[in-house]
Amino acid sequence: MTDTVTTIAAGAILKLAFDEFIKSSAGEAAKRLTGEALVKANALRKEISNYFFDKKNRKATEAIALIEETGSENAFGRLEVYLENAIDDDSLFAAQLRLLVQEVEVLRTVKQVMVDGLKTEDSLEAKGFIQETTISSGVVEQTMLKNTEAKKKVQLTDFKQKT
């Protein structure tokens, strides 16, 4: 029954919902999810939490509490298994998750910076930079050179940005 969710993997869903709690991604969630996207990600997390609470799945609710309290990646892995099973068993729940994930994705911001803070007393020559993103929705902010200084000659060629 996993095909009811098609391309949405449990790990990707949990990453969107619990990113702000995982230690290895501390601060990264705030960069990708701002404003309304963060509100939607919180709604996704609450949907998952409420589902397991309502089903009286003690192990899943303990894993959620541990993730929220300590950012435990081990608990995240366990919750991923519980969520995969829930998606397989409950097509209504899977559809609700899909809708919430789409809402978060539409509001997500992708920021790309290639070079930031480069300073040289000499010349600067750069060529062949390509910056590309493949997201289908959300906001894309691309910066090729930022806060870059060269005391002598600056030569930039073949810079491309694609979305």
Image (spheres, rainbow, N blue to C red):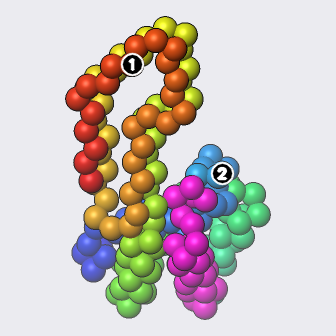
* Depicted 79 relative to depicted 119: above or below: below
Identified at 69% across, 56% down, the residue is 71
Amino acid type of the residue that numbered disc 1 sits on in the rendered structure: Val
* Front position among marks 2 and 1: 1
Which image quarter: residue 110?
bottom left
As drawn, 97 above or below 7: below
Judging depth in this view, the residue of 1 and 121 nearest the camera is 121
* Magenta residues, start to end: 29-55
The residue carrying pointer 1 sits among few (fewer than 14), some (14 to 19) or many (20 or more) residues within 10 Å by Cα, namely: few
Closer to the N terminus: mark 2 or mark 1? 2
Residue 147: x, y in percent?
Answer: 54, 33
Q: x, y percentage for residue 116? A: 52, 33
Name the image quarter holding residue 66: bottom right
Farthest residue to the front: give it: 152
Kindly give the residue lying farthest to the top in the view shown.
Answer: 122
Q: Which element type, helix, strand or loop, lies under badge 2?
A: loop
Residue 34 at x, y = what percent? 57, 66
- For label 2, the crowd category at 10 Å Cα-Cα, with few meaning under 14, some 14 to 19 and many 20 or more, is few
Residue 157 showing in the rendered view: yes
Mark carried by residue 26: 2
Front residue of this view, candidates 76 and 59: 76
Of the residues shown, which amino acid type is indicated by label 2?
Answer: Ala
Residue at left offset 52%, top offset 23% = 149
The answer to which quarter of the image holds residue 21 is bottom right
Q: Residue at x 33, y 19 (%)?
A: 155
Tell me if residue 124 is in the magenta stretch. no
**Which residue is labeled 1 in the image?**
154
In the picture, which quadrant includes the N terminus?
bottom left
Residue lying furthest right in this view?
A: 69
Q: Is residue 42 magenta?
A: yes
